[in-house]
Amino acid sequence: MSSSNAPSLQTADPHRPLSHFMPPANWMNDPNGPIFWKGRHHLFYQHNPKEAWFSGPMCWGHAVSDDLVNWTHLPIALAPTPGGPDKDGCWTGSAVDNNGVPTIMYTGVHPEVQCVATGGDDLVKWQKHPANPVIAQPPPGLDVTGFRDPCVWREDDAWYVVIGSGIKGEGGAALFYRSPDLISWEYLHPLLVGQKESTGEMWECPDFFPLGDKHVLLVSVLGTTLYFIGTYRNHRFYPEIQGNTDFGGEFLRRQELSGRFREAHTLGMDLGRPQRECGESRRMGRRYVFSAHTGN
């Protein structure tokens, strides 16, 4: 994918992919809160602007596109606030349209907490909410393996979020909350708890959405992405089918062994941490999914 404000990068570097989005420089991983806003596609992403390494205080990079192919880089949307709940990084989350107010919910770390920020109409400048962290700790009584990556949606007259987690000794979990305003949250129950032996002990980057007359839960775990398809009724999820969306790791290894790593990298097989685009495109009947390529 090309960038209109850095065209030389596409031709000067023979190792830079031409058909997948990349930041101007340095590290990126998870797509964060893609949203279709005012007729344009906005992509946020986990970004270390200072070095090409998965370390240091993470930020939310930002780019915009009219066609999902040609992207323009915008200023960093979120950066850590010294002394704040996100002082050690602004990590994965979601972006939603809250009655005309663009709103991000994301994870701060050390400890893992959930925070909220609101944006201007151009989605360039963001203001962190003074009540942060809006969810300051995991539910009391749960011994969790993690607490991150909120997936937010509107349902009837309330907001809901699932947060990636896991219950020690049991398995990965998607923890389920409800709020009237994205600020005050009530814990309901686990939307789903897996089995440690078969689906891992920590679920990251959950995504929960309707598909036809069923609902789908996606979670990233054990270097891959799992799906659960089932019935969602009275704020309870009853899974009926389970599977794996990502067989790219095996594919990529075969390509490496046959000496065609660049082809595999360009194809982008071995994907993880998918996120759907929210906002107007969903109301218009279109769905797009962004995912991070996790190969080395």
Image: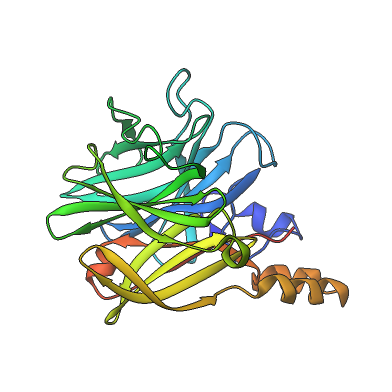
Q: Is residue 111 visible?
A: yes
Query: Residue at (34%, 72%) from the top-left corner?
Result: 238
Percent of width and height locating residue 147: 47, 43
**Across the whole image, how many numbered discs are drawn on residues?**
0
> Considering depth in this image, is 100 or 253 the residue closer to the camera?
253
Q: Seen in the image, is 115 located left or right of residue 186? A: right
Determine whether 96 is above or below 84 in the image.
Answer: below
- Classify residue 232 by image quadrant: bottom left
Q: Is residue 190 left or right of residue 97?
A: right
Picture coordinates of residue 99 (x, y %)?
Answer: 15, 50
Q: How is the image coloured?
A: rainbow
Can you give x and y, in whole percent of width and height, for residue 75 in the image? 45, 38
Q: Quadrant of residue 138?
A: top left
Report whether 105 appears left or right of 195.
Answer: left
Q: Inspect this view and state whether residue 25 appears.
A: no
Quadrant in the picture for the N terminus: bottom right
Look at 62% across and 64% down and name the residue there: 197
- Is 73 on the left-hand or right-hand side of 51? left
Residue 175, percent from left and from top? 38, 52
User: Is 238 above or below relative to 114?
Assistant: below
* Farthest top residue in view: 83
For the C terminus, give its image quadrant.
Answer: bottom right
Q: Toward the viewer: 138 or 43?
A: 138
Picture residue at 37% right of the left edge, 62% below the top: 277
Pick the front one: 215 or 56 = 215
Which quarter of the picture shows residue 136?
Answer: top left
